[in-house]
Amino acid sequence: MSTTTVVIQKRPGFIGKLLLQAFLVLVAITQIYPLVWLAFFSLKDNGEIFSGDVLSFPKKFLWSNYAKALSDGNILSYFFNSVLVTALSIILVLILASMTGYAITRMNWKLSNLTMTLILLGMMVPIHAALLPLFMVLKNLHLLNTYWSLIIPYVAFGIPMAVFILGSFFKGIPRELEESAVIDGCGIYRTFFSIILPLVSPAVATVAIFTFLSCWNELMFAVTFINNTAYQTLTVGMMSMVGTYITQWGIIGAGLMISTIPTIIIYLLLNKQVQKSMIAGAVKG
Amino acid sequence: MNSVFSNKTALSIFVLPTLIIFCTIVMIPIFVSSYYSLLDWNGIGKGTFIGLENYVEMFTDSRALKSMQNSLLFAGASIFIQLPISLLLALILASTVKWEGFYRTVYFIPVLISTVVIAQLWSKIYNADYGLLNTLLKSVGLSSWAQDWLGQKDTALVSSFIPTLWQYIGYHMLLMYAGAKSISQDIFEAAKIDGASRIRTAFSITIPLMKPILKVCLVFSMIGALKVFDLIYVLTGGGPFFSTEVPSTLMYTTIFDTYRYGYGSALSVFIILECLVFTVIINKFIKTD
């Protein structure tokens, strides 16, 4: 940059920069303070929470709130169910969507474009549309109150985005790579599983993060298809826990924290990748 | 070579399972819902075919109309309040500020948290006796402003919008930030040399070039508002006196509390069509290459 441009361009001065930072900090506080407040009151007893001193750090960390939420509040079981349902959904989405995305973008068949269009249309469908018909089908198949009543819909609704993201990665792989694999004697399965799939690991991570967030946080299917406490996931469990401990904010707070911590940990470890995934998911055209 | 890439068995193994699960769970239910919406049916036995009567009821029933009005207000608030804030933040962060990465990370955190947790948290914030909001108001001498935010008809609607607006500011900020960052630096250099101020640059260069991503944000926040369910369901359940009801919560209670499967399905079809229509309209009005 030459000196002339510096002269012409009005750069914000020291005061301007300070005001800008002050504004950004203010927004940061607005975005994060409610969560900090939650973390604090999850460690307090009612006396301290209701004393009107909302800003203060817990006087004594009341970890027993967490113990109570996990055991009496049944959070441990909800947590386990959420992990199981989410993990299976992610695995199934990845298997199905990567195979289909590959077949659509890299294999030669007449209906590939039509199939892609059909699947992408699925991104437009709100889950509301499927709620009652799915409820009836699952009821008739006696699948209500099983893990499958959540896993199957989660996988189905996760497929469009996953096929889209994986497909766009497959498109970017040079043809020569596959051709040389075939010349070396690989069949289609081997080419796909050991040559191509490892190359799209960023897309796999993106899809996994995306699917994690949507399954872990899903409520409408979870509240409709399961009413047996033994199979309920965190989102629904959280609601019944809040109903049980209406006045004991500390325990409720602990429950809310426990269900949020996995997401926060994943985000802190992979925050660049998570941000990229969310952008990739949006820029689908 | 070609035979490998058009291997019929492999194709069926790769595509058929996905297609079957996708069509049965995602696509066919739309048609089933449309059919249900023409019935008077309580889920037991066979329904009676009543044509478009459910739709007539939907557009004449004051509770349903109120729910549609609420969701449109919500969409308006998202577009005219949430998106401008996100845009402002995105523009600031994209224009080389110190600790830009830190702010981006922090602003985005609420997006990742389950709406159920967000709703429970905000119901505590709004709590009339011990909530964060009223306590803060009292501590700055505004005790007279303290009230039961979610319990009164006239404050409940706005109070139930705020958590979603708050939660997704970071999401749109991130998308817009990515859009702004993808603009070539040369253009900014040229603007600088021509003496354009920061604000002028933002309005004449950055924002116009961000059109594609702004359109995506517009569609997302519109559709998101029209579909909103989790937050309202947990926070107010549509109350008090249906003042915060939206079509999806009305659909839910119609189906699972009053067992009017036909009418509920009509509402779900309405939600699908509403989302579709607005997506098409936005795409028609904002042309991008």
Image: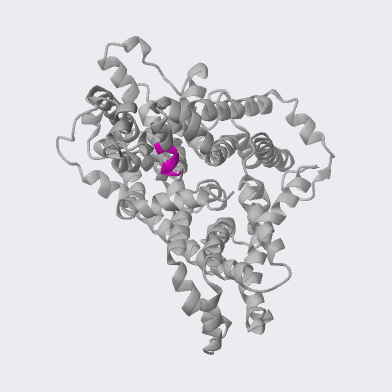
Nearer to us in this view, A210 or B97: B97
Which part of the image, by quadrant, shows the N terminus of chain B? bottom right
Number of numbered discs on residues: 0
The structure residue drawn at horizontal position 63% and vertical position 73%, both measured from the top left corner, is A107
Q: Which residues are the magenta region?
A: B184-189
Which quadrant of the view contains residue B211? top right
Q: Is residue A146 left or right of residue A138?
A: left
Q: Residue at 35% of width from left, 52% of height from top?
A: A272
Q: Is residue A18 left or right of residue A197?
A: left
Name the foreground residue: A232 vs B177. Answer: B177
Q: What percent of the width, then of the height, locates residue A182?
A: 55, 85
In front of the other: A92 or B154:
A92
Residue drawn at (80%, 42%) of the image = B38
Q: Residue furthest left?
A: A59
Residue A44, located in which quarter of the rendered image?
top left
Q: Is residue A110 above or below residue A249?
A: below
- B12 inside magenta stretch: no
Left or right placement of residue B6 versus residue A54 in this view: right
Give left or right: position of A217 versus A263.
Answer: right
Q: Position of residue A270 (x, y in %)?
A: 34, 55
Q: Is residue A270 above or below residue B5?
A: above
* Residue B121 in sight from this viewpoint: yes
Asked if residue B119 shows in the view, the reply is no
Give the image's coloring scheme: one colour
Is residue B116 shown above or below B191? below
Magenta span: helix, strand or loop, mainly?
helix
Screen quadrant of the C terminus of chain B:
top right
Q: Residue at x 41, y 42 (%)?
A: B185
Residue B29 in picture, x, y percent from top left: 70, 53
Q: Residue furthest bottom?
A: A185
Residue B266 location (% of width, % of height): 73, 39
